[in-house]
Image: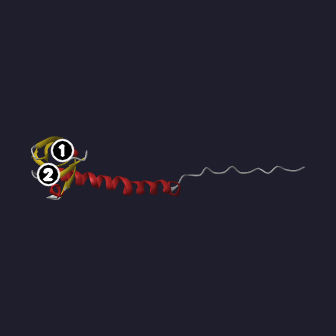
Amino acid sequence: MISFAHAQSAAAATPGITDFLPLIIIGILFWFMLIRPQMKRAKEQKKMLAELTKGDEVVTSSGQVGKISKIGDQYVSLEIADGVITHVQKQSVQTLLPKGTIKGL
């Protein structure tokens, strides 16, 4: 008679570092391409807001261009035209312009 061959059961594979290497690489790329630059921009924005002074020319997030006439803790008064003053939140100031930019517009 023919004897049946008995196959030995395969050992369970243990996950090693090579199995997680693609996930680790994706995580590192995600950090350097997305999170780190965003943190750097937020840090620069916070520094710029802290250094605002009266007379600075700025652009708000809504696109309003003006000269700072008064600064408070939460709000900034912008002179957008002669005698026209608007009040905006300090966090809405997006860009600090070089002196004399408004006259060139």
Query: Viewer-proximal residue, 81 or 87?
Result: 81
Q: Is residue 12 left or right of residue 102?
A: right
In the image, residue 16 lies at what x, y percent? 52, 55
In the image, residue 92 lies at what x, y percent? 22, 45
What's the residue type where badge 1 is placed? Lys
In the image, residue 103 lies at what x, y percent? 15, 56
Q: Earlier in the sequence, mark 1 or mark 2?
A: 2
Q: Which mark is residue 52?
A: 2
Helix, strand or loop for disc 2: loop
**Residue 46 appears in the figure:** yes
- Confirm or deny contact between disc 1 and disc 2 (CB under 8 A): yes
In the image, residue 15 lies at what x, y percent? 54, 52
Q: CA distance from mark 1 to mark 2?
A: 9 Å
Query: Viewer-proximal residue, 35 or 17?
Result: 35
On screen, 85 above or below 16?
A: above
What's the residue type where badge 2 is placed? Leu
Q: According to the image, label 1 marks what residue?
A: 90
Q: Is residue 96 left or right of residue 11?
A: left
Q: What's the residue at 79%, 51% (across, down)?
A: 5
Query: Viewer-proximal residue, 16 or 98?
Result: 98
